[in-house]
Amino acid sequence: MAAGAGTALSRTRILGANDRINLGIIGPGDRGHSVWSQFLKQPDVNPVAAADVYQPYLERAAKTAAQASGGKIAQFEDFRRLLELKEVDAVIVGTPDHWHAIPTIAACQAGKDVYCEKPLSLFVREGRRMVVAARQYNRVVQTGCQQRSGNHYQQAVKLIREGGIGAVHKITAGYTRNAMPGFKPEEILGPGKEIPKGLNWDFWLGPAPAVPYDPFRCHYHFRWFWDYSGGQMTNWGAHNLDIARWALNAKGPRAVSAFGGRYAIKDGGETPDVQEVLYDFGDCVVTWSGREVNRTRDEYLVFHGTKGTLSIMRNGFTIAPETWRKADKPAVEPMQVKGDANQSQTSHIRDFLDCIKSRKRPIADVEEGHLTATMCHLGNIATRLGRSFKWDADKEEIIGDKEANQMLSRSYRKPWKLE
């Protein structure tokens, strides 16, 4: 993983508008396989390889590729073997969050463009290294924040920035559901169970601390453990806080305050089942409400303007006008715009593929993914510390709080390291 910039550039084919893109996937599990399947519907994508530490996922990815292209793909347990293939133009990184940075940086060094699922990183310093690698090796790196490619999201952000609902001084974002009594199935007994055939558990852990195999930590439920993810904050916050920050056209907040914990769900997970975070953007307060104990959905993403309120979800947005005390009629008209989640995903993939050929930066460029992931990480740091702090978005430092600053980075388990 110490390839020079010249080597990386020399490995990249010059693609024309009609050329097919040779694609590989690292981590074709739950979300990874879903994205892989969507990519293979594009006429200019040619599947060539997959890498995963779980054999059944590899076999499923190969079967999906065969159905799409009629051919066989190379299969590897070690993603580094995939990156050695000169014919690979780009890779999807669909791994759990703690495995996003190392493969993405290695792919950039190997001259591959990258579509990395959100959240971009597990911690702040990791994300900045990913941005540096993308720039140093001249790679196109798209973050999987597909809401940015939704036509109705783009229309809403443009409307907000142009003052369509007046000045916005408050944004409410969140994700709520009722997951009581918890996520852990009764048949999962905990650590010490036999490792399933075809799973390299040590490789799955990778840079995370070594622990006995626990099926509850694997697959979808890795999200509830700090060693691998950041709970619903980095799962759904990476979507909705991304749109909020995009609409504000801001790098990040000036200050963060938060409270929460795992209060009601007693299934062995660590991330909050109730979380409230406040972000100070100077002239706008953004709040995040995360809740696993009540399914009210009105906090999904709402922009509160002086002339109207814009509420947006993946199926569209509505505007409800405000009437000032001394006004005869509302300053804006009510509006309802439909959206299409499938269009958002397809357009996001298409944007990445087109940028591979044009060498332009995609709509959810690695820098944007990093800034949004940072916003999520700061919310989790404030929650875990139970206190407020000020943030310098230019220096990417927490001001005057040594303990909080130490949480911007983490150590990797040997032999893994952040190049």
Image (cartoon, rainbow, N blue to C red):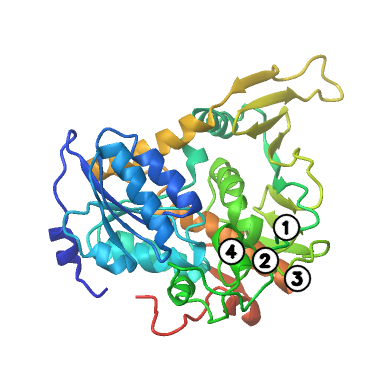
What whole-number distance in Å separates the C-alpha atoms at marks 4 and 1? 22 Å
Tell me: 114 left or right of 269.
Answer: left
Q: Identify the secondary structure beneath mark 1.
A: strand
What whole-number distance in Å separates the C-alpha atoms at marks 3 and 2? 35 Å
Residue assigned mark 4? 222
Residue drawn where x is 61% and y is 50% of the image: 236
**Amino acid type at image mark 1:** Val
Residue 260 location, quadrant: bottom right
Q: Identify the secondary structure beneath mark 4.
A: helix
Marks 2/4 in contact by CB < 8 Å: the verdict is: no
| Residue 120 spot, x, y in % from top left | 47, 58
- Structural crowding at the residue carrying mark 2, measured as other residues with C-alpha within 10 Å and reported as few (<14), some (14–19) or many (≥20): few
From the image, state whether disc 2 or disc 4 is nearer to you. Answer: 2
Q: Earlier in the sequence, mark 1 or mark 2?
A: 2
| Residue 178 spot, x, y in % from top left | 78, 48
**Number of callouts:** 4
Residue assigned mark 1? 277
Residue drawn where x is 81% and y is 52% of the image: 293
